Amino acid sequence: MHTDGDSLFEAFLNQHDETAWNGIIADLLPDIHEVDRTATRIWFAFYPLALSQALHEVADRELLVRKLLLQGRYRLSEQIDSSHAFLFGHRYWPEIKRSVLRAVTDRNPPPSLDLAELIREVASDACGGLKVASALTLGITAVGFMTIQQAGVAGMRASPGEIRIDPRRMAMSPDQVCRARARDKSQGLFGFLRGERKEFRVTFNENDDRAGFPLINTQHLTTAAALDKRPHHTIESRCTPEEGPIPVQCRSASCGTCWVGVLGGAEKLSEVATLERDRIREFGYILTDKPKPFIRLACQAQAFGSVSVVIPPWNGVFGKLLRPRGAPHEKTP
């Protein structure tokens, strides 16, 4: 049921645009555990507020979808529980969801008009019952508040609050996950003989041991992915039988289909060249001048070691319309 408290809180959230949220995330990042620091930034890049607001406000949504060349599942409201399965904090989602909704349903004004501080307070309240450090609940709590801003209180309430992590992954500690992301595939006893032909691994879903493929040193991510001939296209319609698990249409940085988030191993990828940086900005995925950012076009990124990536469920070209030249870059501590 929609209450006055809901309306009050949603009005409070709607005072924050994407620039404000960039500042909030930059404020929170130092206090988020390393295991979710990059993952949180990836999630906010995957579900940009500017795109959500444009789709909500436009009179002819389907026309805008065609204009922005949107493909896949770009509506956060349709994947509230699954969108953040790559965050370590996802395992705490049922309690976080309840804690965020408790804050929302309070008929009084928000206890803090500083949204970053409010996120900290809710994350801290939740971690008491979970018996974990607030550094592990902070990122997923920020996700919860953004989810309400995009999908509404009713949408959040309607989601089952399911956890989408396999038991093996659930048993891992945050430090174990971080070490696994940093580890390179063993080259075997005589690996030194491989030279430049060293073989590494690209993981594209940490919740599935089968979700990975080999990569020869210096290969582009999409080149290596194309050798994985399993029927990924039967699961993800944007994939083709020829190109493997990473959706791709052009391999020339022209379509934006192959964008990925880099959970681990960003330092093992080639630096962003001018073409890739300009295209990422045009697509609207991220605004950054960093040489090795956490969002990449897989067709342009060469790997020199094992990496862990997340494949977003959609792609499009909305930067020119929604993020004009001169828009602020990402804020980082």
Image (spheres, rainbow, N blue to C red):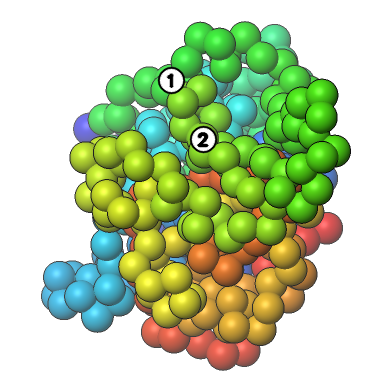
Q: Which residue is mark 1?
A: 163
Label 2: how many Cα within 10 Å (few below 14, some 14–19, many 20+): some
Tell me: 126 left or right of 6.
right
Image vertical order of residue 230 relative to residue 260, above or below:
above
Q: Residue at x 47, y 77 (%)?
A: 252
Residue 52, percent from left and from top: 36, 62
Q: Along the line of sight, which residue is nearer the eye, 3 or 190?
A: 190
Secondary-structure class at tag 1 = loop
Residue 275, percent from left and from top: 59, 83
Tell me: 312 left or right of 199.
left
Is residue 242 visible in this depiction of the protein? yes
Rounded to the nearest angstrom, the CA distance separating label 1 from label 2 is 22 Å
Sequence-wise first label, 1 or 2 = 1
Secondary-structure class at tag 2 = strand
Image vertical order of residue 324 relative to residue 92, above or below:
below
Image vertical order of residue 326 relative to residue 130, above or below:
below
Tell me: 213 left or right of 60.
right
Q: Which residue is mark 2?
A: 212
Q: Residue at x 55, y 55 (%)?
A: 221
Q: Along the line of sight, which residue is nearer the eye, 318 or 226?
A: 226
Residue 261, percent from left and from top: 56, 52
